[in-house]
Amino acid sequence: MRYILAPNLRLRPVPELDSCVVLAPGEGGGPRLLRLNAHAWLLLELCRAGMMATALREAYREAVVPPLDAAAAAESLDQGLALLLRQGLLLEKNPEEAMP
């Protein structure tokens, strides 16, 4: 499995606030404006390349350990991916599917 950014997202980093603003298409046609914390922003950046789930886990762990320990990093990753998927900012792709 790999994760990729949903189409038509616009990301605007706000590093001075350790966050990123995302303009995403809304379900009713209107845009949604979301503010992501540093961990969610990191996940989106790592997913831009469409890396496989194993590589994503390793890259995320390397980025956040320390200050998080390995178990906390894995939990943070799982929660972050679930939230980004629910919000429609990420898509799951099978390895055989072509990159967009």
Image (spheres, helix red, strand yellow):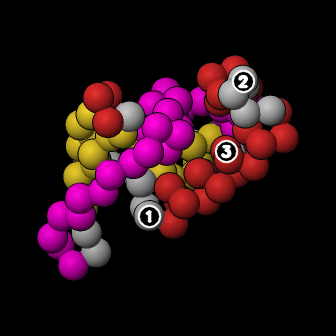
User: Type of residue at label 3?
Assistant: Leu
Where, quadrant-wise, is the C terminus in this rendering? top left
Task: Work out whether 68 lies above or below 36.
Answer: above
Q: Residues within 10 Å of mark 2 (few under 14, many from 20)?
A: few
Task: Inspect this view and state whether residue 37 appears.
Answer: yes
Please check the rendered image and state whether residue 43 is part of the magenta-colored stretch, yes or no.
yes
Q: Residues within 10 Å of mark 1 (few under 14, many from 20)?
A: few
User: Type of residue at label 1?
Assistant: Gln
Question: In the image, which is nearer the foreground, mark 3 or mark 1?
Answer: 3
Q: CA distance from mark 3 to mark 1?
A: 15 Å
In the picture, the disc for residue 87 is: 1
Of the numbered discs 2 and 1, the one sitting upstream in the chain is 2
Q: Do labels 2 and 1 touch, CB within 8 Å?
A: no
Give the residue pinned by disc 2: 66
Q: Do labels 3 and 2 touch, CB within 8 Å?
A: no
In the picture, the disc for residue 77 is: 3
- The picture quadrant where one finds residue 33 is bottom left
Q: CA distance from mark 2 to mark 1?
A: 28 Å
Where, quadrant-wise, is the N terminus in this rendering? top right
Q: Position of residue 51 (x, y in %)?
A: 60, 30
Q: In terms of secondary structure, where does tag 2 sit?
A: loop
Task: Inspect this view and state whether residue 98 appears.
Answer: no
Of the numbered discs 3 and 1, the one sitting upstream in the chain is 3
Task: Work out whether 82 lies above or below 54.
Answer: below
**Residue at the farthest right position:** 71
- The picture quadrant where one finds residue 19 is top left
Residue at x-position 72% and y-position 23%: 66
Q: CA distance from mark 3 to mark 2?
A: 14 Å
